[in-house]
Image: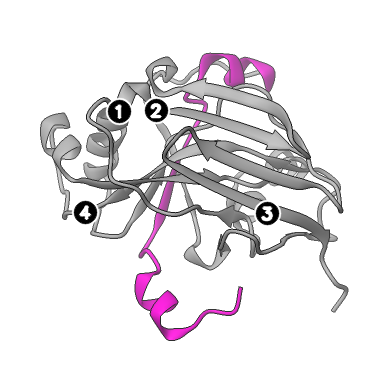
Amino acid sequence: MTATAPEVARRPGKIVCVGRNYLEHARELGNDVPERPLIFLKPPSALLAPGAAIELPPDSSRVEYEGEIGIVVGARLRHADETEARAAIRGVVALNDVTARDLQKSDGQWTRAKGFDTFCPVGPESPPPGDLDGLTVVTRVNGQERQRGAAREMAFSIPTILAYVSRVMTLEPGDIVATGTPAGVGPLAPGDEVEVEIVGVSLVRNPVVAAAAR
Ligand code: MG
């Protein structure tokens, strides 16, 4: 993505993600749901607009989609409780937490696996619905459904996650929190088209290409 000045102005200060927040997904990768939210960061430089290409880096032989419900923070949150966290939600976005699965395993921590440029497609922002638990995320590859999960199935609810994160780092307006992916993750290949939809709320669709050698 070539960032213009307005895009830079809208860029979030940080993207905080939650791992293993759906039991079936944790199990498919051989993990349990953790006792508390497992959080990590994606760099804002990974952001990708709808329609722009996800680039598969030569460093990885296994890049996978992870469709997620993304939350856009609208007010500063520090040591918030769940009621304050719920009130601070400004918007909901479809988000693809693209992951180099092989590097996630080999590196022992996730910065490289989660942090390549183009690894964070994000759809248009919509206001949050009254019932967050009713949010449903669906991922399709080449038109075929691969993942479907509802917020009510999460191990840790959206307000619980925001409150938890806010005890570690101050959440600021524009920050994005990715709330974990349901079961059904799988690989992407050049020529694929992957889309993540928050049903009735936001959709991000991107082609997949091999990164040009540089
Ligand atoms: Mg994820």
Q: Which mark is residue 132?
A: 1
Q: Quadrant of the C terminus?
A: bottom right
Which callout, 4 or 3, points to the residue nearer the camera? 3
- Mark 1 is on which residue type? Leu
Tell me if residue 3 comes above or below residue 57 in the rendering. Answer: below
Q: Secondary structure at mark 3?
A: strand
User: Which residue carries the number 3 mark?
Assistant: 206
The residue at the point 27 percent across, 45 percent down is 168
Task: State which region is magenta.
Answer: 1-29
Q: Amino acid at mark 3?
A: Asn
* Viewer-nearest of discs 2 and 4: 2
Q: Earlier in the sequence, mark 1 or mark 3?
A: 1
- Residue 4 image position (x, y, % from top left): 49, 83
Q: Which residue is tagged 4?
A: 74
Q: Residues within 10 Å of mark 1 (few under 14, many from 20)?
A: some
Contact (CB < 8 A) between labels 2 and 4? no
Query: Mark 3 and mark 1 in contact (Cβ < 8 Å)?
Result: no
> Is 12 covered by the magenta stretch?
yes
Q: Amino acid at mark 2?
A: Leu
Q: CA distance from mark 4 to mark 3?
A: 26 Å
Q: CA distance from mark 2 to mark 4?
A: 19 Å
Q: Real-space Cα distance between discs 1 and 3?
A: 26 Å
Q: Amino acid at mark 4?
A: Gly
**In-front residue for pair 105/14:** 14
Q: Quadrant of residue 7?
A: bottom left
